[in-house]
Amino acid sequence: MQQAEIGIIGGSGLYQMPGFTESREVAMETPFGAPSDVYVLGKLEGRAIAFLARHGRGHTISPTELNFRANIYGMKMLGVERIMSLSAVGSLKEEHRPGEFVIVDQFVDHTKHRISTFFNEGVVAHVALADPTCGELSKVVKAACDKSNITAKLGGSYLCMEGPQFSTKAESNLYRSWGLDVIGMTNLQEAKLSREAEICYATVAMVTDYDCWHAGHDSVTVEQIIAVLVQNASNACEVVRSAVAAMPQERRCKCGAALKHAIITQPDKISPAARKRLALLLDKYLPQAVEAR
């Protein structure tokens, strides 16, 4: 039974979503372990929502330690079809000022220690990721920003670094030379896994600072960032509420069929254990997996 249709992942500074009615907490265990925290389920603007604090309430999990697979698979187990991911980022361009949002549509992976696929240990699938975010969902989010009078750009590239340290000046200027827009530590893995799970995904990159390339921002401190985080969190809640209220009931994008031609492994070569582990993803395309259990 579907318990939620829209998922919200809150990043640094956003550990709860105000305005929920019929709110309840659900602790889950997935085939990939435990998610970052409990999912808070409730109604927002009449829609069934699942909220997850990416780093846990109290911010206890570093970017490298995040169990991305459990976080996204847990959303899938709840029945979520769309995820809005809210993330604090540094700006790599003068035009993206602290306090503004970027609805990114591209990612560059500069991480080193992440697992970012459900398909391993005997099951191989290659999903298309040329456009790693859902264009339809991103447009809804941008319209919500406009309605909330929050400056936001639709489109932009997100450099996903390992962290938890911030960039050196050499790194920051290198990323700028690549023409990238913002830098963060979390969202690429979420985008990849959401696509594999056939969930629409959009990132709201909330700018907190100019990283260390900018004159006057060459030594970014946590205190400076937190000051902007507080305002960004308030604005993000307003954007989420407006986006949820305007969200179409039906999906017309291709995200919901991302695995249709992606599973390469022959069905008879997939072990019963793998079929059980990935049942939510495989059963739609391999009905014999249902019969085998």
Image: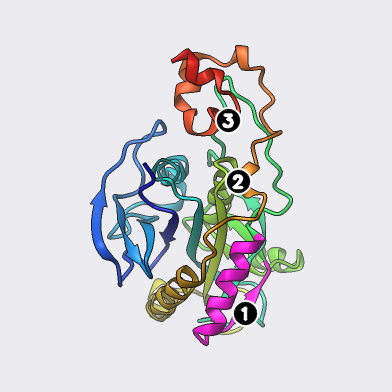
- The amino acid type, in three-letter code, at marker 3 is Phe
For this orientation, the residue located farthest to the front is 249
The residue identified by callout 2 is 256
Disc with the residue nearer the chain's start (3 vs 2)? 3
Instruction: Give percent across and percent down for residue 278.
Output: 49, 29
Magenta region: 135-156
Q: Is residue 151 magenta?
A: yes
Is 115 placed above or below 255 here?
above
Instruction: Give percent across and percent down for residue 205.
Output: 54, 68
- Mark 1 or 3, which is nearer the eye? 3
Instruction: Give percent across and percent down for residue 11.
Output: 42, 62
Q: Secondary structure beneath disc 3?
A: loop
Q: Residue 119's mark?
A: 3
> Residues under labels 1 and 2: Cα distance?
32 Å
Q: Residue 96's mark?
A: 1
> Residues under labels 1 and 3: Cα distance?
36 Å
- The amino acid type, in three-letter code, at marker 1 is His
Looking at the image, residue 189 sits to the left or right of residue 126; the answer is left
Q: Is residue 209 magenta?
A: no
- Marks 1/2 in contact by CB < 8 Å: the verdict is no
Residue at 46%, 72% (x, y): give it: 245
Instruction: Give percent across and percent down for residue 107.
Output: 66, 56
Disc with the residue nearer the chain's start (1 vs 2)? 1
Residue at 32%, 36% (x, y): give it: 29
- Mark 3 or 2, which is nearer the eye? 2
Residue at 67%, 35% (x, y): give it: 260
Looking at the image, residue 66 sits to the left or right of residue 129; the answer is left
- The amino acid type, in three-letter code, at marker 2 is Gly
Quadrant where the C terminus is found in the figure: top left
